[in-house]
Image: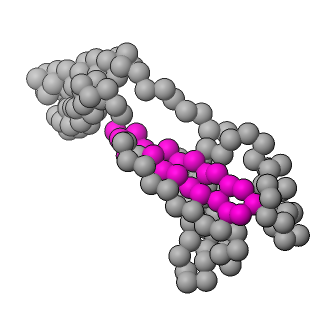
Amino acid sequence: MRRDVKHSRWNDLGYLMVSLVLVGCGILALVKDSCQVLGWVGIALFGACSLVFLYQLMTGRSLENRHKCEDKITFDAAGFAVTRVKGRSLQSRSMAWSEVCSAIAFKRDLLAVDCVCLLLARENGTGIEVDEEMEVGRNLPRRFLLICRAARRGKTGS
Protein backbone atom coordinates (compact mmCIF):
# COMPACT_ATOMS: atom_id res chain seq x y z
CA MET A 1 0.00 0.00 0.00
CA ARG A 2 1.38 3.38 -1.00
CA ARG A 3 1.10 6.29 1.38
CA ASP A 4 1.50 9.81 0.04
CA VAL A 5 3.07 12.37 2.36
CA LYS A 6 1.85 15.93 2.05
CA HIS A 7 4.53 18.54 1.51
CA SER A 8 4.54 21.06 4.38
CA ARG A 9 6.54 24.23 5.00
CA TRP A 10 6.47 23.47 8.72
CA ASN A 11 8.14 20.12 8.09
CA ASP A 12 10.78 21.83 5.95
CA LEU A 13 11.42 24.39 8.68
CA GLY A 14 11.75 21.68 11.33
CA TYR A 15 14.09 19.58 9.19
CA LEU A 16 16.15 22.68 8.36
CA MET A 17 16.55 23.50 12.06
CA VAL A 18 17.56 19.93 12.94
CA SER A 19 20.06 19.87 10.05
CA LEU A 20 21.58 23.17 11.16
CA VAL A 21 21.90 21.90 14.75
CA LEU A 22 23.69 18.79 13.44
CA VAL A 23 26.00 20.97 11.31
CA GLY A 24 26.77 22.84 14.53
CA CYS A 25 27.59 19.54 16.25
CA GLY A 26 30.00 18.75 13.41
CA ILE A 27 31.69 22.15 13.87
CA LEU A 28 31.88 21.52 17.61
CA ALA A 29 33.57 18.15 16.97
CA LEU A 30 36.16 19.92 14.79
CA VAL A 31 36.82 22.64 17.36
CA LYS A 32 37.22 20.22 20.26
CA ASP A 33 39.51 17.95 18.18
CA SER A 34 37.51 14.95 19.40
CA CYS A 35 36.91 13.43 15.98
CA GLN A 36 37.99 15.29 12.84
CA VAL A 37 36.57 12.82 10.33
CA LEU A 38 33.16 12.63 12.02
CA GLY A 39 33.04 16.42 12.19
CA TRP A 40 33.72 16.87 8.45
CA VAL A 41 31.28 14.10 7.48
CA GLY A 42 28.57 15.65 9.67
CA ILE A 43 29.14 19.11 8.22
CA ALA A 44 29.06 17.83 4.62
CA LEU A 45 26.04 15.55 5.05
CA PHE A 46 23.84 17.80 7.16
CA GLY A 47 25.02 20.91 5.30
CA ALA A 48 23.70 19.36 2.07
CA CYS A 49 20.46 18.46 3.83
CA SER A 50 20.18 22.06 5.04
CA LEU A 51 20.53 23.34 1.48
CA VAL A 52 17.77 21.02 0.24
CA PHE A 53 15.37 22.01 3.03
CA LEU A 54 16.20 25.69 2.53
CA TYR A 55 15.42 25.33 -1.20
CA GLN A 56 12.11 23.63 -0.41
CA LEU A 57 11.25 26.28 2.17
CA MET A 58 12.06 29.17 -0.20
CA THR A 59 10.31 27.78 -3.29
CA GLY A 60 7.41 26.00 -1.60
CA ARG A 61 7.92 22.78 -3.55
CA SER A 62 9.82 19.59 -2.96
CA LEU A 63 12.63 18.32 -5.16
CA GLU A 64 10.89 15.00 -5.82
CA ASN A 65 7.69 16.63 -7.13
CA ARG A 66 9.18 19.28 -9.41
CA HIS A 67 8.85 17.08 -12.51
CA LYS A 68 5.68 15.32 -11.43
CA CYS A 69 3.00 14.77 -14.04
CA GLU A 70 -0.67 14.07 -13.64
CA ASP A 71 -1.91 11.46 -16.10
CA LYS A 72 -5.51 10.60 -16.75
CA ILE A 73 -6.82 7.77 -18.90
CA THR A 74 -10.25 7.82 -20.50
CA PHE A 75 -11.72 5.09 -22.68
CA ASP A 76 -14.84 3.87 -24.42
CA ALA A 77 -15.71 1.05 -26.80
CA ALA A 78 -13.87 2.74 -29.70
CA GLY A 79 -10.53 3.32 -27.97
CA PHE A 80 -8.72 5.16 -25.21
CA ALA A 81 -6.82 8.40 -24.60
CA VAL A 82 -4.08 9.33 -22.15
CA THR A 83 -3.94 12.99 -21.13
CA ARG A 84 -0.83 14.29 -19.37
CA VAL A 85 -0.81 17.53 -17.41
CA LYS A 86 2.70 18.72 -16.60
CA GLY A 87 2.88 22.18 -15.19
CA ARG A 88 0.87 24.32 -17.60
CA SER A 89 1.23 22.08 -20.64
CA LEU A 90 -1.35 19.53 -21.72
CA GLN A 91 -0.58 16.55 -23.96
CA SER A 92 -3.08 14.00 -25.18
CA ARG A 93 -2.51 10.76 -27.10
CA SER A 94 -5.19 8.37 -28.24
CA MET A 95 -5.45 4.94 -29.81
CA ALA A 96 -8.33 2.91 -31.20
CA TRP A 97 -8.81 -0.60 -29.81
CA SER A 98 -8.51 -1.93 -33.37
CA GLU A 99 -4.94 -0.53 -33.56
CA VAL A 100 -3.76 -2.53 -30.55
CA CYS A 101 -1.87 -5.61 -31.73
CA SER A 102 -0.14 -6.54 -28.44
CA ALA A 103 -0.21 -5.74 -24.75
CA ILE A 104 2.95 -6.08 -22.70
CA ALA A 105 2.71 -5.94 -18.91
CA PHE A 106 5.81 -5.09 -16.91
CA LYS A 107 6.99 -3.71 -13.59
CA ARG A 108 8.95 -0.45 -13.43
CA ASP A 109 11.37 -0.30 -10.49
CA LEU A 110 11.12 3.13 -8.83
CA LEU A 111 13.58 2.21 -6.04
CA ALA A 112 11.25 2.60 -3.05
CA VAL A 113 8.13 1.30 -4.80
CA ASP A 114 7.28 -0.54 -8.01
CA CYS A 115 4.80 0.57 -10.65
CA VAL A 116 2.80 -1.94 -12.69
CA CYS A 117 2.65 -0.81 -16.34
CA LEU A 118 0.94 -1.96 -19.52
CA LEU A 119 2.23 -1.08 -22.99
CA LEU A 120 -0.49 -1.24 -25.63
CA ALA A 121 1.42 -1.49 -28.91
CA ARG A 122 0.57 -1.00 -32.58
CA GLU A 123 2.01 -3.14 -35.39
CA ASN A 124 4.63 -0.49 -36.24
CA GLY A 125 6.10 -0.70 -32.73
CA THR A 126 4.67 2.56 -31.39
CA GLY A 127 2.17 2.51 -28.57
CA ILE A 128 0.86 4.04 -25.39
CA GLU A 129 1.93 3.07 -21.91
CA VAL A 130 -0.58 3.10 -19.05
CA ASP A 131 0.19 2.46 -15.41
CA GLU A 132 -1.47 1.99 -12.05
CA GLU A 133 -0.80 5.58 -10.96
CA MET A 134 -3.00 7.12 -13.65
CA GLU A 135 -6.29 8.66 -12.66
CA VAL A 136 -9.05 6.55 -14.19
CA GLY A 137 -12.27 7.44 -12.46
CA ARG A 138 -14.74 5.21 -10.68
CA ASN A 139 -15.63 1.59 -11.48
CA LEU A 140 -12.69 1.08 -13.83
CA PRO A 141 -12.52 -2.75 -13.63
CA ARG A 142 -16.25 -3.13 -14.28
CA ARG A 143 -16.30 -0.58 -17.15
CA PHE A 144 -13.13 -2.04 -18.68
CA LEU A 145 -14.59 -5.55 -18.66
CA LEU A 146 -17.81 -4.34 -20.29
CA ILE A 147 -15.87 -2.52 -23.01
CA CYS A 148 -13.62 -5.54 -23.67
CA ARG A 149 -16.65 -7.82 -23.96
CA ALA A 150 -18.39 -5.37 -26.30
CA ALA A 151 -15.25 -5.03 -28.45
CA ARG A 152 -14.91 -8.83 -28.64
CA ARG A 153 -18.53 -9.09 -29.86
CA GLY A 154 -17.98 -6.33 -32.41
CA LYS A 155 -20.17 -3.71 -30.74
CA THR A 156 -18.95 -0.11 -30.75
CA GLY A 157 -21.39 1.53 -28.30
CA SER A 158 -20.31 2.11 -24.70
Residue extending furthest toward the front: 157
Tell whether 113 sits left or right of 143.
Answer: left
| Number of numbered discs | 0
Q: Nearer the viewer, residue 96 or 131?
A: 96
Quarter of the figure that contains the N terminus? top right
Q: Position of residue 134 (x, y in %)?
A: 59, 48
Give x and y (percent) for residue 122.
61, 77
Q: Is residue 64 visible?
A: no
Does 105 appear above or below 46?
A: below
Q: Which residues fall within the magenta stretch?
A: 63-85
Q: Residue furthest bottom?
A: 124
User: Camera-side residue: 118 or 77?
Assistant: 77
For the C terminus, the quadrant is: bottom right
Q: Say which residue appears at 64% left-offset and 59% top-offset.
A: 80
Find out whether residue 28 is within the magenta segment: no
> For residue 101, what is the image quadrant?
bottom right
* Residue 132 place in picture, x, y as percent: 64, 51
Residue at image location 88% in from the left, 70% down from the top: 153
Side (left or right) of 124 relative to 80: left
Asked whether 46 or 26 is in front, the reply is 46
Residue at 30 percent across and 29 percent down: it is 56
Specify whether residue 66 is painted magenta: yes
> In the figure, 107 relative to 88: above or below?
below
Q: Nearer the viewer, residue 122 or 17?
A: 122
